[in-house]
Amino acid sequence: MAFTLAPLPYAFDALEPHIDARTMEIHHDKHHAAYTNNLNGAIAGTDLENLTIEEILVKGFDKMPVRNNGGGFYNHNLFWEIMTPGGSNVPTGALATAIDEAFGSFDKFKEEFAKAGATRFGSGWAWLCVHKGGKVEVCSTANQDVPLMPGIGCGGFPILGMDVWEHAYYLHYQNRRPDYITAFFNVINWDIVGEKYNANK
Ligand code: MN3
């Protein structure tokens, strides 16, 4: 079963001025498309072919084309989903409580999440993950690795991911990754992150 690239669930310019339309178009139509195509090529005719993407992230972990492209496929699906339009711009409900318990406050969480993204050397992701029982944790991973892979990151279930590859921000922000990170907080759809928290805690 081949994986397909879902359309971006909103217009390319929907996240302006925080993330520019051209970046979104190239990111989705070129980068995410390439991960999807390369994943399909890497699993074709192998025993991974009929597994779910989550199963592939675990069982294909030691095969580098599968690991990189499976992660790239999965991570970007999450990335598009957790960004606006719409939704609350702050966590609410059980997720808000869990963030306060883990970090002390929403502002402290933002500091820790921004630091995870800013200090990831080279390419990678910052994550907010939930552990069974409801505790939330911030971590970061290299390249297209994702905490669902064995022994990677904090080992929780990712409910919010921030792409800090240069292709996510370079056209508009050039080398200013911290400015992109600051802007990213303006485009998070916390309602969806909260739904993911409730479904996986
Ligand atoms: Mn990317």
Image: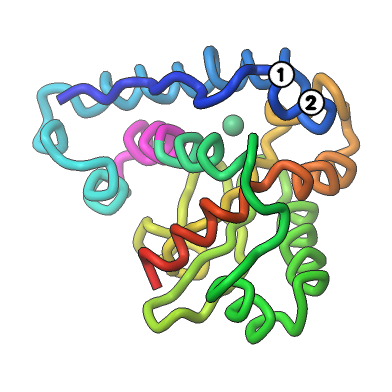
Q: Secondary structure at mark 2?
A: loop
Q: Is residue 45 above or below residue 186?
A: above
Q: Is residue 177 left or right of residue 145?
A: right
User: x, y percentage for residue 95?
Assistant: 56, 71
- Calculate the distance from the C-alpha at mark 2 to the C-alpha at mark 1: 5 Å
Q: Is residue 26 above or below residue 95?
A: above
Magenta region includes residue 70: yes
The residue located at (44%, 58%) in the rendering is 196
User: x, y percentage for residue 11?
Assistant: 61, 18
Label 1 is placed on what type of residue? Asp
User: x, y percentage for residue 4?
Assistant: 31, 21
Label 2 is placed on what type of residue? Glu
Tell me if mark 1 has few (under 14), some (14-19) or many (20+) residues whose alpha carbon lies within 10 angstroms of its own. Answer: some
User: x, y percentage for residue 33?
Assistant: 45, 17
**Which residue is under mark 1?**
13
Q: Quadrant of residue 139?
A: bottom right
Q: Is residue 179 above or below residue 33?
A: below
Q: Secondary structure at mark 1?
A: loop
Q: Is residue 102 above or below residue 120?
A: below
Q: Is residue 29 left or right of residue 124?
A: left
Tell me if mark 2 has few (under 14), some (14-19) or many (20+) residues whose alpha carbon lies within 10 angstroms of its own. Answer: few
Is the Cβ of the residue at disc 2 closer than 8 Å to that at disc 1?
yes
**Which residue is under mark 2?**
16
Q: Quadrant of the N terminus?
A: top left
**How many numbered discs sit on the rendered protein?**
2
- What residue range appears in magenta? 62-73
Which is the main secondary structure of the residues drawn in magenta?
A: helix
Magenta region includes residue 108: no
Q: Quadrant of the C terminus?
A: bottom left
